[in-house]
Amino acid sequence: MTETKWLDFAGFLNACKFGLENNACPYLKFHQFDQYQKLELLLHVSEKEAVEMMQCCNNQKQNCQKPKREISLRSLELELVP
């Protein structure tokens, strides 16, 4: 794999902004790895595997949802000691 393609794939992996509720996500396991495991995967992935994973992701993206974040006012309040 060329350096440019490798960088594109690595950026693609780390740019996912969606939640992990989609069980068909090809990166579900990747998101659970620590930094060392992620690097190992990136060092050993072939160009063919990378292209297949990106195509699978693009096909599944409509089934993904951005994670919902709820802001609690309680966490924004200052706690006053009586």
Image: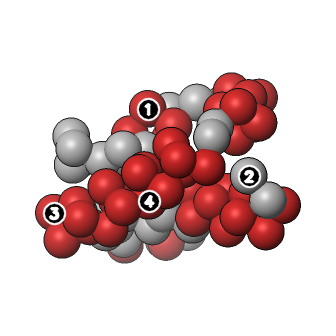
In front of the other: label 2 or label 1?
2
Residue type at the position of mark 2: Met
Please state which of the two labelled residues, at mark 4 or mark 1, is closer to the viewer. Answer: 4
Q: What residue does disc 2 label?
A: 1
Classify mark 2: helix, strand or loop. loop
Residue bearing the label numbered 1 = 29
Kind of residue at disc 4? Met
* Left or right relative to 26: residue 23: left
Label located before the other in sequence (3 or 4): 4
Q: Nearer the viewer, mark 3 or mark 4?
A: 4
Residue 16 drawn above or below residue 39 = below
- Give whichever of discs 4 and 1 has the lower sequence position: 1
Residue under label 3, please give it. 63
User: Of the residues shown, which amino acid type is indicated by label 1?
Assistant: Lys
Q: CA distance from mark 4 to mark 1?
A: 14 Å
Can you say whether 29 is above or below 17 in the image?
above
Q: CA distance from mark 3 to mark 4?
A: 15 Å
Using the rendered view, name the quadrant where residue 72 is placed.
bottom left
Residue at horizontal 64 percent and vertical 37 percent from the top: 45
The residue sitting at 76% across, 36% down in the picture is 43
Number of residues whose C-alpha sits closer than 10 Å to that of mark 1, classed few (under 14), some (14–19) or many (20 or more): few
Q: Earlier in the sequence, mark 1 or mark 3?
A: 1
Rendered location of residue 18, percent (x, y): 37, 63
Answer with mark 4 or mark 2, whichever residue precedes in sequence.
2
Q: Amino acid at mark 3?
A: Asn
Mark 3: few/some/many CA within 10 Å (<14, 14-19, 20+) = few
Question: Do callouts 1 and 3 mark residues in contact (Cβ within 8 Å)?
Answer: no
Q: Which residue corresponds to the image point at 50% horizontal and 43% vertical from the top-left? A: 49
On the image, the x and y values in percent for residue 81 come to 57, 56
Q: Which mark is residue 54?
A: 4
